[in-house]
Image (tube, rainbow, N blue to C red):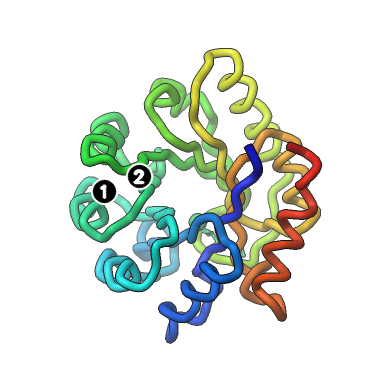
Amino acid sequence: MSVKLAPSILSADFSDLKSEVKKLEKAGADLVHIDIMDGCFVENITIGAQVVKALRRHTNLFFDVHLMVVNPEKHIDKFIESGADNITVHAETTHHLDALLNKIKSVGKKASVAINPATPIYLIENVLEIVDMVLVMTVNPGYGGQKFIPYTLKKIQNLSEIRKREGYNFEIEVDGGINEKTIVECVKAGADVIVAGSYVFESENIEKAINKLKNSVRDLR
Ligand SMILES: O=C(CO)[C@@H](O)[C@H](O)COP(=O)(O)O
Ligand SMILES: [Fe+2]
């Protein structure tokens, strides 16, 4: 299976998200990555479920919603109703990871777990058999345009080995500091879904940027 590219709208023009999402659809994005930040788990504040719901009316693109909020159980119903296709919750934000993931799955959505760079894999070991995706943060969450943290590659490799050994089906997603060099290292380590924000939206041409990233890993799969 080829690598999937998920541009993050964190680096898009927030005054015109509708057009930005439509541009991504035309440019061949596989998913659109939507960062939800609460100013508490991370410093930044972005958008809520209402904006996701409003965007849903304008595209059929797969909505990959990355929740960076404390107590995600308080907000989960709203995000389920928003039209998200996948909902990712951070292991660091809830005491009830299993219950939350199962709730998301029970309504037919994809359910995924994210871990910060310094969070060890063993913390999510028990949910690996139920998740659709594991999001390995390759920067500290909160902002776009940060530098890739190299030690996270080892975590991607370890997850990939566990997946093979145990016969699990989850995809491995990476998020933060992706460019045409770091994408190669991540895919070689085992990543399947690549989030890229500033690389895509700060380029002169979104379509060319997406193709450049995809082409740089084409022969690796
Ligand atoms: O979740 C986050 C940041 O917390 C990301 O999804 C960013 O949007 C990635 O941005 P770049 O590092 O690709 O610019
Ligand atoms: Fe993200």
Q: Which residue is drawn at 61% across and 55% down?
A: 176
Q: Is residue 130 left or right of residue 152?
A: left
Q: Where is residue 146 in the image (x, y as percent from the top left)?
A: 65, 62
Say if mark 1 contacts mark 2, CB within 8 Å.
yes
Secondary structure under the numbered disc 2 in the rendered image: helix
Mark 1 Cα within 10 Å, few/some/many (few <14, many 20+)? some
Mark 2 Cα within 10 Å, few/some/many (few <14, many 20+)? some
For the C terminus, the quadrant is: top right
The quarter holding residue 78 reads bottom left
Secondary structure under the numbered disc 1 in the rendered image: loop
**Front-most of residues 185 and 220:** 220
- Note whether residue 189 is visible: yes
Q: Which residue is drawn at 70% across and 38% down?
A: 153
- Note whether residue 95 is visible: no
Q: In this view, does 60 lie above or below 85?
A: below
Q: Position of residue 70 (x, y in %)?
A: 31, 51
Q: Which amino acid does label 2 sit on?
A: Thr
What residue sits right under mark 2 in the picture?
93
Q: How many labels does the image show?
A: 2
Q: Position of residue 19 (x, y in %)?
A: 46, 81
